Amino acid sequence: MKPQSSDDRSNVIDLFSGRPIDDVVDRIIRITPELDGLEMLYTNDTSPNRLYSLKIVCWALRESGEVVGLVPWLNQVVPCTEINDPLNGRWEGYRDPGTNDIFYNTPRHKIMELELAEEFYHLDHVRDGEIVQEIPDGIGTHAVLTDNGFRSFVLIEVLSWRLMADGTVHAMLVDEEKVKSTPVLPGDESLYSAQEQAEFKYFFQHRIANKIKEQDPEALAAISMLIES
């Protein structure tokens, strides 16, 4: 078979999007919450022989058709397989804490759910800044905000996750001064994006966030390490 030249790529069609492959940006086009407590496993250089776990917030369908788990990681929402940090964090797989099974591929039921939802709700044209989806946070994520170099900081619960037209996923926080009715639900006018705030620094899941609130020495030491790095 004759090798395909780079000039021929414009004639190659991506099977999932139906567009020329060079036009496909691997952005996120659909998300679905993780409702069964599945986790990401990872290691880092501090304890290379020890596995750590982090709850998956949702699963994401990319424009290419790939489905990946997403986690709040430092100051971003990233695919589990692409985590990276100053301690060289590395993805090691997925885990079902109910059965303790470890696996490396996205669960088939999540792939089917996302593909069918995308087929049903497919949008041919979305404008920049348009909201595609919004799902509630189900893992107790908190955002850390500070404007004085961590001499003081606040922890704010993430209420929801908002998928935008450009494929970015934003953590939505509640502006208490703008709340007109309770409970505050996804889509409420009082919500604002954590990542769009200059004071936003990091995400923490509820276990670490609660330890920070309790002034736990280990949790405060972890914050100090992040500040130094």
Image: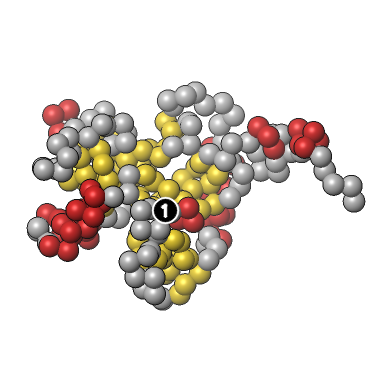
Marks counted in the figure total 1
Q: Is residue 135 toward the left or the right of residue 177 in the image?
A: right
Q: Is residue 162 toward the left or the right of residue 82 in the image?
A: left
Q: How is the image coloured?
A: secondary structure
Residue 20: x %, y % from top left: 71, 34
Instruction: Decide which of 114, 229 is in the foreground and name it.
Output: 229
Q: Identify the residue at image location x=52%, y=62%.
A: 107
Quarter of the figure with residue 112: bottom right
Question: Above or below — where is 63 with respect to 113?
Answer: above
Residue 182 appears anywhere in the view: no
Quarter of the figure with residue 208: bottom left
Instruction: Decide which of 128, 222 is in the foreground and name it.
Output: 222
Residue 43: x %, y % from top left: 39, 66
Q: Identify the residue at image location x=32%, y=40%.
A: 171
Q: Identify the residue at image location x=68%, y=34%.
A: 22
The kind of residue on which mark 1 rests is Asn
Residue 83: x %, y % from top left: 43, 54
Q: Is residue 117 toward the left or the right of residue 2 in the image?
A: left
The residue singled out by tag 1 in the image is: 84
Going by the picture, which residue comes out furthest to the front? 228
Question: Above or below — where is 192 with respect to 1?
Answer: above
Instruction: Decide which of 22, 17 is in the foreground and name it.
Output: 22
Question: Above or below — where is 217 with respect to 140?
Answer: below
Q: Is residue 212 toward the left or the right of residue 132 in the image?
A: left
Dot 1: element: loop
Q: Identify the residue at image location x=36%, y=58%.
A: 87
Residue 25 appears anywhere in the view: yes
Question: Above or below — where is 142 with respect to 176?
Answer: below
Residue 143: x %, y % from top left: 24, 44
Going by the picture, which residue comes out furthest to the top? 127
Mark 1 Cα shell of 10 Å, populated few (<14), some (14-19), many (≥20): some
